[in-house]
Amino acid sequence: MVKAYSWLIFCVIVWGSNFVFGKMLIQHFSPTVLTELRLLFIVMFLVGLAAFKKAFASINKTDFILLFVLGVIGVFINQWSFFAGLQTADPTTSALILAMTPILAGVLAAVFLKEKLTVRMLLGSIIAILGIFFVVTKGNFSTIHVDQGLLWIVLTMVTFAIMIIMTRVLSQRINPLTITLYSNIVGFIVGLPFISALDHPIRISLQIHDWAFLIGTAVVVHGIATLIWNQNIRHVDASKASILSNLEPFVAMVMGFVLLYKPITGVEILGSLLIVGGVVLSTLQRKKKVSHSG
C-alpha cells in the first residue's frame, strides 16, 4: 500500500510539474510546433508499448468516429490550448483552473451519462469557483482582468473534461492503451496542417538540451506517469487517489518557485485551499476508480 501511494505521489509531482515544464518549453518552441513534437514522441512511445503488449486492436466504425472526435478535442485542442495559454498565463493559476476538471466532468456525466448530480457536488463547485475568482483577481474583486492565456487554459480544462467522459464511455469496450494510442495518433495527424496556420512565427529551438527536455517530459508526463498511475490505482481507495491528484496545483506552485523563481503569494495559497477543498468536497463521494488519461 505504501509503495502504491509512493508511485501515485510521484505521478502527481510529475503532472503538477508539467505546468512549469510547459512554461519553460514555450520559450523555445511555438505552441503548435511544441504540441505536434510532443504528440510525435508520445505516439512513438505508445506504439512501442502497444507492440510489446500486442495491444493493437481493430475497432468498429462507431468507435472509430468517437476516437477521431476524442483525438481532435481531447488530444490536439487540449494540448494546443495548454501551450498557447502558457505563453502568457501563470503556471500556478493554470494548474488551479485545471484542478476544476473533475467538477466539470461530473456535470457532463450528469448531462450525457445520466449520472446523479448531488447537492454536495454543487456546493463544492461554488467553493472551487470562488477560489478561482480569488486567484485570478489576486484577491481584489473590483479589478477583474483576465489574461487571454487563461481563456485558453479554460478551453484546456473543458476539453480535458470531455476527454474524461469520452474515455470512460470507450473504455467499456476498448483497452485504455488502445484508446490512448489511437486518439494520440489522430491528434498528431489532425494537428500537422495547423502548424503554419496557427504559429506566427514558427519557433523551433536548435539546442540539444531543449529537445532532450521536450522528449523526456513528453514521454514521462504522458506515457510513463499515466501507466504508473493506472497500474497502482487498483491498490488504493479511489476517493483517496482523487484527493492526491488535487495536489497538482501545490506542486506547480512549489516548482514555479524552485525553477522559475516565482514567489508564492498568500492569495494563491488561500485560493488553492478553496479550489482543492471544493473539488474534494464535490468528488469525495464517488467510489469508482479514477484513471488518468494523460
Image: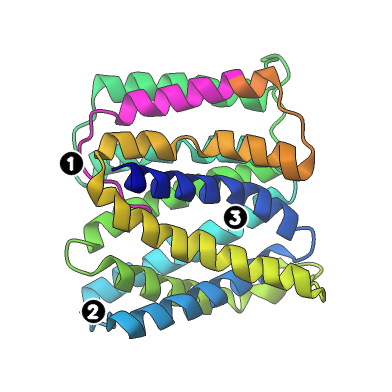
Compare marks 2 and 3 and give the one earlier in the sequence: 2
Q: CA distance from mark 2 to mark 3?
A: 28 Å
- Nearer to us of marks 2 and 3 is 3
- Location of the N terminus (image quadrant): top left
Q: CA distance from mark 1 to mark 2?
A: 25 Å
Q: Which mark is residue 61?
A: 2
Q: Residues within 10 Å of mark 2 (few under 14, many from 20)?
A: few
Residue placed under numbered mark 1 in the picture: 114
Secondary element type, mark 1: loop
Q: Residues within 10 Å of mark 1 (few under 14, many from 20)?
A: few
Secondary element type, mark 2: helix
Residue 272 magenta-highlighted:
yes
Compare marks 1 and 3 and give the one earlier in the sequence: 3
Three-letter amino acid code at disc 3?
Ser
Eyeballing the image, is 130 above or below 160?
A: above
Three-letter amino acid code at disc 2?
Lys
Three-letter amino acid code at disc 1?
Lys
At 62% across and 42% down in the image, what residue appears?
151
Start-end of magenta stretch: 270-294
Give the percent coordinates (x, y) of residue 121. 31, 25
Q: Are marks 1 and 2 in contact (CB under 8 Å)?
A: no
At 57% across and 66% down in the image, what residue appears?
218
Task: Please identify the residue farthest to the front as the structure is shown.
Answer: 2
Q: Is residue 293 visible?
A: no
- Location of the C terminus (image quadrant): bottom left
Residue placed under numbered mark 3 in the picture: 81
Give the percent coordinates (x, y) of residue 138. 70, 21
User: In the rendered picture of this protein, how many numbered marks are placed on residues?
Assistant: 3
Judge left or right: residue 41 versus residue 158: right
At 22% across and 73% down in the image, what residue appears?
62
> Of residues 44 and 34, which is closer to you in this image?
44
Eyeballing the image, is 61 above or below 286?
A: below
